[in-house]
Image (cartoon, rainbow, N blue to C red):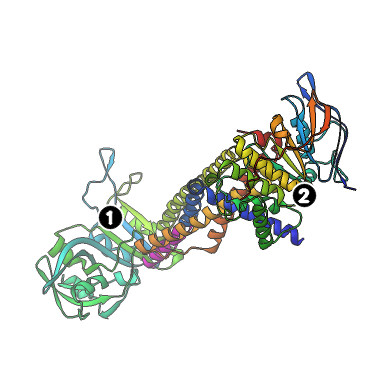
Amino acid sequence: MPGRVIQISELTKIYKMGEVEVRALDGVDLSVDEGEFLAVMGPSGSGKSTLMNIIGCLDRPTAGTYQLDDVDVSKLDRDERAVIRNAKIGFVFQSFNLLARTSAIENVELPMLYGELGWSRDKRHAAARESLRRVGLAGREDHYPSQLSGGQQQRVAIARALVTNPAILLADEPTGNLDSRTSEEIMGIFQRLNDDGKTVVLITHEPDIAQYAKRIVHMRDGQIQHDEVGKQKRPVAMVMK
Amino acid sequence: MKNSVMRMGNITVVGLKAISRNKLRSILTMLGIVIGVGCVIAVVAIGNGATKSVEATINSLGTNFIMIFPGAATQSGARIFTGQSTLTAEDADGMKAEAPAVAYVSPMVRSAAQIVSGELNWGTSIQGVSTDYPLIRSWNVSQGDFFTDTDVKAAAKVAVLGNTVVDNLFPNGDAVGQIIRIKNVPFKVVGVLEKKGGNMMGQDQDDTVIAPYTTVMKRLAGKTKIDMIQVSAVSGSQVQEAQNEIEAYLRQRHRIQPGQDSDFMMRSQEEIAQTQAQSMGILRTLLLSIAAISLLVGGIGIMNIMLVSVTERTREIGIRMAIGAKGRHVLMQFLFEAVTLAIVGGLIGVAIGVAASLGVGHFLKWPIVVTPASVALSFGVAAFVGIFFGFYPARKASRLDPIDALRYE
């Protein structure tokens, strides 16, 4: 029986814009089990970014509870959330968000610099190297982001997200800046990592991309409209270097 | 505990990397601190050196020393210096008898000439004095003898040479008994003076020829008046008394009515020292305030660059926060960067300051001493400037909202 990774109930987020209150999330219930590959879909303004920020512990809900890996994280303060982000969440962003003028391996080592575990230099290095290998970038450890293609940069970002072995990979439009062929490659990597047991939560507005997930949640006006188990599209060719 | 130490080490690595990624900007940022610290060290060292050198040269003037210069003459109510000296050799001659607090008196007549000895020649100053001169200046001969009162009375063509003159005219060192020619007048060298060193203006006091004032007046300068009278008081406590006596004596001799200004001026060794110390103090305060302003400007420069850096790296801060950096980590990183810039700048400043001090010391032949205290002080100030001016930008960075920071373009 797989464990429950995300347990969200009655989650509400209200933004105050002057006098007006905007209900970005309006009583969301969602649970994700270990090993799932979930896509959250919806048009802009549907609340999916707000949901992602809360799932990613970047933000706190106004009301409701959120349990991540059996820990209630909805009431944590800034620093406590930073620790949770470091240990349990691997972010992959649309714009890669690598540090410029910093080699691939140094980018991947970054989360370990802030970790509570106190990794030694050698351990950091070994873990980063292994992580890069898993995304097919062995041999490019010393390349700088400017020397890498968009797809390769995104793979470095995935390696960085993976390196602390987090409970979930949280990908926010990870293919938004990539062409369709490279997008397919990147989605293939997520699928492979998911096959190995990693829980993946993908935020996207592209139906094509959502197809790669096992389960698709549609959002509209801050609520979950429907929650379906898809048939999961596989990339045409699993191009893995 | 071990973990937190290790994490601090990591933050250090992160900060150092950020600095090395922006070398030119880092160097420019440091410049203000470099100049400030360099200034402080150089000013303190050179100031100390100058003070010591002045003390040494003022002491080298002699003991209980008083100088009397010809002064302003009053003509038709206007105080002017006529160019014509008001002091005569007779003023000096009668002084000992009339002023009991005076121990030694020597007139001084100055001239300058090219001195020839065989094939060699050397341009130097010639000072005509009396036999009291070595006693006033505590300046003895190292070879031969000083000239005698008989020589003075007879305006004998004898001379005592300073060390530098000997070095240049008699490289073999055997000067006593030789003949030198000053303005074509042959002089017999009777003695060589001890080495005395530079005076407070940096002039070499050993670069001189001493002869009886009578000889210099008659045969070399063609003067009837003298340029200065040098006096030594009986004791340190009687310097003021001696000055009063000299004043009364000279005013009487020069027939100056009560209420009229004297036609001479007097400076005691103490007054010279005080004046020197005062101008030295003013100079030092001035330079130190420049240094302080430079440090302040340097600090503002660091703050400015750090603020720009925080804005420019908002995205980076967002990324770091997303992957688990706490506010404290970001604060420490930016603070560390600022402090490192300040400290590295401080180190370069120390190096430049020490080099400049030694350079000036070598050039002016001052006993320059770079005190550890001034190094520690300026270095500490630099570090403080880094922390003080780095804190605000660092705190600003640490308080960014990760969501906004990640979205920042």
Q: Chain of mark 2?
A: A
> Observer-nearest residue: A115 or A241?
A241
Q: Are marks 2 and 1 in contact (CB under 8 Å)?
A: no
Looking at the picture, does residue A82 appear above or below residue B232?
A: above
Residue A228 in picture, x, y percent from top left: 83, 32
**Res B273 → quadrant:** bottom left
**Quadrant placement of the N terminus of chain B:** bottom right
**Quadrant placement of the C terminus of chain B:** top right
Residue at the image point whose x is 47% and y is 64% from the top: B369
Residue that numbered label 2 is attached to: A87
Residue at the image point whose x is 31% and y is 63% from the top: B230
Q: Is residue B77 visible?
A: yes
Q: Residues within 10 Å of mark 2 (few under 14, many from 20)?
A: many
Q: Is residue B401 visible?
A: no
Q: Chain of mark 1?
A: B
Q: Is residue B343 left or right of residue B48?
A: right
The span picked out in magenta is: B44-62
Residue that numbered label 1 is attached to: B253
Residue B21 in picture, x, y percent from top left: 53, 49
Does dot 1 land on a helix, a strand or a loop?
helix
The amino acid marked with disc number 1 is Arg
Q: Is residue A204 left or right of residue A229?
A: left
Q: Main secondary structure of the magenta part?
A: helix
Looking at the picture, does residue A206 appear above or below residue A76?
A: above
Spatial distance from mark 2 to mark 1, Cα to Cα?
101 Å
Does dot 2 land on a helix, a strand or a loop?
helix
The amino acid marked with disc number 2 is Ala
> Observer-nearest residue: B68 or B92?
B68
Residue B90 in picture, x, y percent from top left: 23, 61
Q: Is residue A141 magenta?
A: no
Q: Is residue A112 left or right of residue B191?
A: right
Residue A172 in picture, x, y percent from top left: 70, 36
